[in-house]
């Protein structure tokens, strides 16, 4: 009788477990069954749907290839920059070091020009004879030559300064380019990871879902059944608690029977029996009590654990070992997610031993885990430290201490009573219990 009830449950839920799109059949028997229900899809519609998936996969794969080529180019550029940055730095220091010696040389020659000018001016002022004027002219010619040489040296000094500025700017530009290239390389690598993720999700078959009880629970239940004295404190669910979620055809996937400690499934009579269901690509197949290793490879696996699921890795983290985001020290908060764990690819799901969370996880898996995690995964917020007060930086503590000292110096101590001049004032405050101070 119980087996019959199970069969009824499976038939009822068969329709409920489908995607929004109606199932598509390729086999004649399936097509005939759908025609009787008025659910026929043409081969052209099926082909069009498959072509869209294929085009998306090809587009993503092409993007991956292109991005990987960019990564190789960027890595080559990075090696070139790292190798050359030392030369740019040496050029900067060399040109900078050339400024001061040439400046000293220019300044020294300037004194020579000044002395030459003074010499020829003095000669002209003291000249009286033809010979004196001839000597004065020679001195002036020497001065003019030195002025010309000085002007050329000034031009050269300007070039040296300009070169130093250019070399320094080049060095820092290359330094910035190196940092930007490193950042760009990380972005490209991140993009490849995201494209790989999208490709895997686009190419993945979301048709099969497996719900299993953890191995620990299966062993505990069997031991408790075989040994009446064996008692465990676990909160395990049984397959009998979950069988209403199964929508497989037992004649295809294997017959379900009561083994005493729990329901079990016999081996399928068919090899590669899952191909039967693949004829209906839009129909979600939910297998409770899986007994075949191959179905695990094809399915999203929901594992019902022996105890409540708790973890500190934020849901959907790209790195399986990342705990970034699980602590907010500024708010004195740490976060723990509970009851449902879903990996980034929606292939492995762990749930607490609670029917509510099993069904909730199943709903999300049937949607390919596209809902925001916060909409269905419980999150607990805890304090890092009890009675926590945000500490002030040491520099702010010092400032406040100085301010307190200044205030104490400026503001005099309040008198312990009221100063009164008249007797009436003294009497009034005394009657009210307020001390009076003589002026």
Image: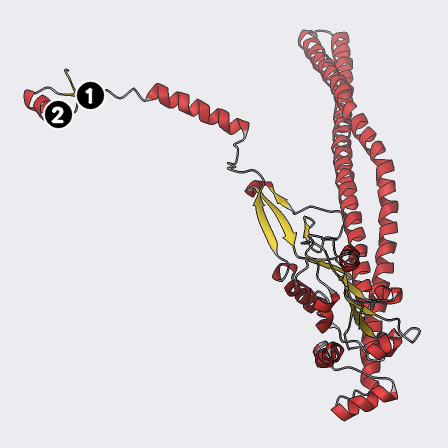
Q: In this view of the protein, can residue 77 be seen by the observer?
A: yes
Quadrant of the rendering where the N terminus is positioned = bottom right
Q: Residues within 10 Å of mark 1 (few under 14, many from 20)?
A: few
Quadrant of the rendering where the C terminus is positioned = top left
Which residue is pictured at 74% across the width and 80% down the height?
4
SS of the residue under disc 1: loop
Which residue is pictured at 85% across the width and 74% down the height?
254
x, y percent for residue 104 = 74, 17
Q: Label 1, on which residue?
A: 417
x, y percent for residue 302 = 75, 62
Looking at this view, is 37 or 105 the one in front?
Answer: 37
Furthest-right residue in this view: 271
x, y percent for residue 70 = 85, 54
Q: Residues within 10 Å of mark 2 (few under 14, many from 20)?
A: some
The figure's colour scheme reads secondary structure
SS of the residue under disc 2: helix
Q: Label 2, on which residue?
A: 429
Q: Quadrant of residue 97?
A: top right
Q: Quadrant of residue 358?
A: bottom right
Q: In this view of the protein, can residue 18 be seen by the observer?
A: no
Furthest-bottom residue in this view: 36
x, y percent for residue 346 = 75, 62
Residue 434's place in the image compared with 223, above or below, is above
Residue 82's place in the image compared with 259, above or below, is above
- Report, in whole angstroms, how far the alpha carbon at label 1 lies from the one at label 2: 9 Å
Looking at this view, is 163 or 297 the one in front?
Answer: 297
């Amino acid at each position: 009788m119980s087996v019959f009830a199970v069969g009824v449950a499976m038939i009822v839920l068969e329709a409920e477990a489908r995607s929004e799109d109606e199932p598509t059949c390729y086999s004649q028997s399936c097509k005939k069954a759908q025609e009787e229900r008025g659910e026929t899809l043409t081969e052209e519609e099926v082909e069009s749907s498959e072509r869209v998936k294929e085009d998306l996969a090809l587009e993503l794969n092409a993007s991956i290839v292109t991005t990987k080529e960019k990564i190789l180019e960027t890595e080559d550029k990075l090696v070139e920059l790292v190798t050359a940055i030392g030369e740019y730095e040496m050029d900067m220091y060399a040109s900078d070091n050339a400024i001061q010696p040439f400046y000293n040389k220019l300044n020294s020659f300037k004194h020579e020009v000044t002395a030459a000018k003074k010499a020829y001016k003095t000669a002209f002022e003291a000249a009286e004879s033809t010979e004196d004027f001839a000597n004065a002219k020679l001195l002036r010619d020497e001065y003019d030559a030195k002025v010309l040489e000085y002007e050329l040296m000034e031009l050269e000094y300007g070039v040296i300064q300009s070169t130093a500025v250019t070399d320094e700017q080049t060095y820092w530009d290359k330094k910035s380019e190196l940092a930007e290239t490193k950042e760009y390389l990380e972005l490209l690598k991140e993009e490849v990871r995201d494209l790989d993720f999208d490709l895997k999700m686009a190419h993945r078959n979301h048709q099969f879902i497996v719900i299993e009880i953890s191995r620990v629970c299966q062993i505990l239940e069997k031991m408790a059944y075989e040994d009446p004295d064996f008692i465990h404190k676990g909160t395990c669910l049984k397959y009998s608690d979950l069988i209403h979620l199964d929508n497989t055809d037992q004649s295809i996937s294997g017959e379900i029977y009561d083994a005493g400690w729990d329901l079990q499934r016999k081996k399928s009579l068919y090899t590669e029996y899952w191909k039967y269901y693949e004829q209906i690509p839009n129909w979600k197949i939910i297998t409770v009590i899986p007994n075949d290793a191959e179905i695990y490879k094809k399915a999203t696996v929901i594992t019902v654990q022996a105890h409540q699921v708790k973890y500190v890795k934020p849901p959907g983290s790209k790195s399986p070992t990342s705990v970034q985001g699980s602590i907010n020290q500024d708010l004195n908060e740490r976060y723990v997610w509970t009851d449902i764990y879903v990996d980034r690819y929606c292939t492995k799901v762990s749930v607490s031993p609670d029917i509510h969370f099993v069904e909730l996880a199943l709903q999300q898996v049937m949607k390919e885990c596209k809902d925001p995690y916060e909409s269905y995964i419980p999150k607990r917020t805890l304090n890092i430290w009890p009675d926590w007060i945000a500490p002030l930086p040491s520099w702010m503590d010092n400032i406040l201490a100085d301010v307190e000292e200044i205030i104490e110096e400026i503001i005099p101590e309040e008198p312990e009573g009221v100063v009164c001049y008249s007797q009436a004032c003294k009497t009034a405050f005394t009657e009210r219990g307020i001390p009076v101070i003589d002026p």
